[in-house]
Amino acid sequence: MLMVTKIIDLNEDTVTTEFKVTKDCIFVNNDRFTESGIIENAAQSCSAIVGQDFFAADDLEGAGNSIIGFISGIKKAHIFLLPKTGDILTTKANLLSNYSAGNFSICTMECKIYTGKELVADCILNFLIQEV
């Protein structure tokens, strides 16, 4: 399930996304977005930064490549509140480090998630992204 509704801004070092929490989301329990959903939202938002290196600029549908990504480590994760259904999350991530070799990339990213001006979570995640 996609945890990003819209990409607001994307460059080679940062991304800002939005996600509307809906009742049918698999990460909603008792009308609240769960901790695992928050981490998945962060992961999918972060993957847009490094993942874009695997696609041609004119491949807007992603038809030319297939990639898979894994959270290889969670260095830090603080969750301050569980958003309600209907809330719109704004996720801001930046690339801290990246090692790319051929068809894979290992990276560390910092991510902050907000609903309105309230901080929902902040985390630092390690990823392995690989072309398959």
Image: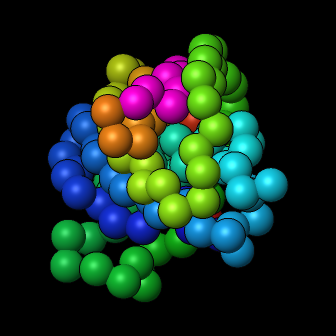
Could you tell me residue 32's position as x and y percent? 69, 50
Quarter placement of the C terminus: bottom right
Q: Is residue 33 above or below residue 57?
A: above
In the rendered structure, the answer to whether residue 94 lies left or right of residue 35 reads left
Residue ID at (20%, 52%): 9
Residue ID at (51%, 31%): 120
Residue ID at (36%, 83%): 61
Could you tell me residue 63's position as x and y percent? 43, 84
Residue ID at (26%, 71%): 56
Q: Is residue 92 above or below residue 32?
A: above
- Most extreme residue toward the top is 76
Could you tell me residue 131's position as x and y percent? 54, 60
Q: How many marks?
A: 0
Magenta-tinted stretch: 118-126
Res 29 quadrant in image: bottom right
Quarter placement of the N terminus: bottom right
Res 38 quadrant in image: top right
Main secondary structure type of the part rendered in magenta: strand
In the rendered structure, the answer to whether residue 49 lies left or right of residue 132 reads left
Of 90 and 86, which appears nearest the observer? 86
Is residue 89 in sight in this rendering? yes
Could you tell me residue 92's position as x and y percent? 34, 37
Q: Is residue 61 magenta?
A: no
- Most extreme residue toward the right is 29
Of 84 and 5, which appears nearest the observer? 84
Of 26 and 59, which appears nearest the observer? 26
The colour mode here is rainbow
